[in-house]
Amino acid sequence: MIEKVQAYLKEVDGFSSNSLEEIEAFRIKFLGKKGVLTALFADFKSVPNEEKKAFGQALNQLKQSAQEKVDALKAELGSDESSKSSGLDLSRPGYPLPLGSRHPVSLVRKEIVEIFSRIGFTVSTGPEIEDDWHNFTALNFPPEHPARDMQDTFFVESEDEMALRTHTSSVQVRVMENGKPPIRTISPGRVFRNEAISARSHCIFHQIEGLYIDKNVSFADLKETLLYFAKAFFGKTKIRLRPSYFPFTEPSAEMDVYWGLETEVDKRITKGTGWLEVLGCGMVDPQVLENCGIDSKEYSGFAFGMGIERIAMQRYGITDIRMLFENDVRMLEQFKSPWS
Ligand code: DAH
């Protein structure tokens, strides 16, 4: 009797099929109402007592194996069919996600913001479409100043003479109008000038503006702050301030960083002078403070402004400013770095 059960067990173990009908036939044969197992359980009564235990165990094993076999074959068939119909292979490894990179202009902006934030400057921003007051008048540009000319400024057709801001100095005005000293802020942003596009200049570029207003702020504070920046950003220890002119600062200066003339690259970068021109700066003109509602007898301050593209080009050896605006992935990919 028990040999019969074992023969069935072998048959169950050896069975395999990928046809639903065959599997169903197999199920009916073993597990159906009139199937092998029903018959064997009926035989159980006639098994001698001493063999009942072993026979019973063998029967249970057969039943379990048959059920497991049916389940396993059906599952296999099911997953096979669904993958055929949807074309999905859930066991495939995932596609690698392409990682982007930061734009060189963003990298430089981020670093400059970070350097000034270490000495208490916070970021402020203003609108790109500006009125005449914030871009020019409050900053002491006389009515006939050439910067207001059509050649420099993109005017927006509107009743109230709006224009695309030509510099981020407009944000200074907004910060002073809306806040009270002490003010320590830097304002990165996009600016627009109606200039011919070439390797050296573009009609859209970025600037960072700095403004510090408090009691007793002196030119020495400006110089120290700029020297700190030159050390932190360029790793250079010598700067010079050349007298210059801006309508909104008095006195005004341009800052150069001493680069040296050791290599051919140094010579090229500094046009043979050893000095790299970096930014414009000066003490905020008392009239500008008054224009913005700050008492110029109580407060003084300094401001500075620099172009981000020029600094990025110098830092990364980019020879044509247009490359920064073309969004050519082959160029931008070179700025991939794990920490940026
Ligand atoms: N706004 C000037 C420009 O666009 C740059 C500048 C010069 C900003 C001197 C300043 C400054 O704050 O003090 O060329």
Image (cartoon, grey):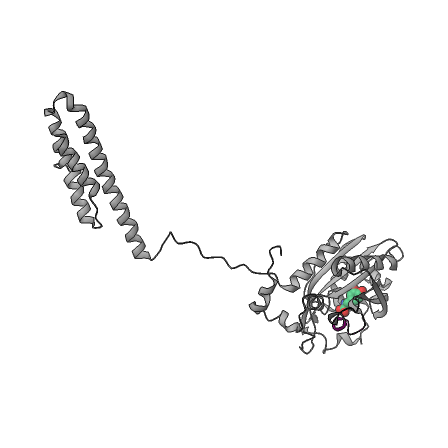
Rendered location of residue 151, percent (x, y): 72, 78
Magenta stretch containing residue 279, yes or no? no
Question: Residue at the location (63% across, 69% down)?
Answer: 324
Residue 166: percent from left, percent from top: 72, 70
Which quarter of the rendering shows the C terminus?
bottom right
The quarter of the image holding the N terminus is top left
Report whether 137 appears left or right of 297.
left
Residue 43 location (% of width, % of height): 11, 28
237 displayed left or right of 114: right
Residue occupying the point 85% across, 64% down: 285
Residue pictured at 15% horizontal, 24% vertical? 51
Quadrant position of ligand 1? bottom right
Q: Is residue 64 left or right of residue 140?
A: left
Residue 138 shows up from this direction: no
The quadrant holding residue 248 is bottom right
Q: Can residue 65 be seen in the rendering of this structure?
A: yes
The answer to whether residue 214 is above or below residue 304 is above
Q: For the image shown, how many numbered marks are present on the structure?
A: 0
* The residue stretch that appears in magenta: 267-272
Q: Nearer the viewer, residue 266 or 169?
A: 266
Q: Which residue lies most toward the left here?
A: 46
Q: In this image, 18 relative to 266: left or right?
A: left
- Quadrant of the rendered image containing residue 145: bottom right
Q: Position of residue 155 (x, y in %)?
A: 68, 74
